[in-house]
Amino acid sequence: MEKNQTASTVYRKERSNTGFWLVVIGAALWGVDPLFRIILLQTMTSTQIVLIEHIIVSLVAIPVLWKFRADLKNLRARHWVAVIFISWGGSALATVLFTMALTNNDPNTVLLLQKMQPLFAIVLAKLLLKETLPRRFGGLFFIALAGTYLLTFGFTLPLGNWNTWIHAGSLLSLGAAALWGGSTVMGRLMLGQARYETVTSLRFVVALPLLFLMTWHEGAAWTFPSGTGEQAAVVLNVLGQALLPGLLSLLLYYKGLSSTKASVATLAELSFPMAGVLVNWIAFRTLITWEQLVGFILIWIALFAISRQQERSASVADAAPKLRTE
């Protein structure tokens, strides 16, 4: 009996570790997103880019939904609320905000601010999934806020410049981080009820009506380059954007999330801004400033403290059943 329990514990830990690294790889693929998106912004608006991306992925997702349509019968009202949040908030609005942020701020600032995602996700995991908050979370949260301020403004005060910063890319990026952090929690809720393929497909398909409405309301003209080479570049970047940081990344992400706690998975998502900054450095020669580095370190300190507490909590939880049987 003891051997069976030991084998079961090892299997759970191995599955959890595999899930953690799948989330890491999936989130890292999001980091190559600006490589495609910045080029597309030269010919399309943020909303148009996101709409086309979702249409392309939906061509793959709809047959998947048909194959696993039995999953849809198991969804209750709260699961459909989670689907709408993931698709409308995390897939449509957050992606549009992120794309707009890239046009209004330094790309590294936009990416590094995504390190705030774990804080949003941990709070929502507490409220919705009843996961316990780390000790001294309030103090750690303010440390992370200080880091966020440095990433956004450096050591300057924005007083007197409200019109220049209130709509800045930093706020757009934080909005995207909040929606993506919430989507992590909602995705974890959904994966207890449906396959990861179903959740991934629903994320794209359900977002389409909102994106069509947003694009229509925006009223921007659709433009397309006239040169053959420029047209080919747009097509290749659209396909690359939809299939790599779009479809493939989310398949890996939700597969990993199915065996990973939301509060832990959101820490694995930090590979996203890390990979993004690396891409910016290699492709666009964009380096971070020392103020951004200080802000980055402050946020990392807060998240590292939280992750250490999560590890200790997991160790105590694993030890508890053993103590009860002795």
Image (cartoon, rainbow, N blue to C red):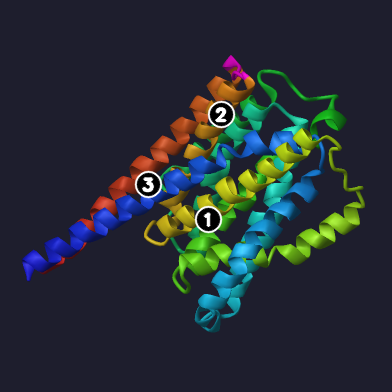
Find disc 3 in the rendering and name its residue: 21
Q: What's the mark number on residue 71?
A: none
Q: Given the image, on which type of amino acid does mark 1 rest?
A: Thr
| Magenta span includes 288 | yes
Q: Residue lying farthest top?
A: 290
Report which quarter residue 149 is drawn in: top right
**Residue hosting label 1:** 184
Please say whether residue 317 is visible from this viewpoint. Answer: no
* Precedes in sequence: disc 3 or disc 2: 3
Percent of width and height locating residue 291 = 60, 18
Q: Is residue 82 above or below residue 93?
A: below
Q: Earlier in the sequence, mark 1 or mark 3?
A: 3
Q: Residues within 10 Å of mark 1 (few under 14, many from 20)?
A: many
Q: Earlier in the sequence, mark 2 or mark 1?
A: 1
Instruction: State the mark number for residue 279.
Output: 2
> At 70% across and 55% down in the image, what residue appears?
92
Prevailing SS of the magenta stretch: loop
Q: CA distance from mark 3 to mark 2?
A: 20 Å
**What amino acid is at disc 2?**
Val
The magenta region covers: 285-290
Assess whether mark 3 and mark 1 are in contact (beta carbons under 8 angstroms).
no
Q: CA distance from mark 1 to mark 3?
A: 15 Å
Q: Nearer the viewer, mark 1 or mark 3?
A: 3
Rounded to the nearest angstrom, the CA distance separating label 2 from label 1 is: 24 Å
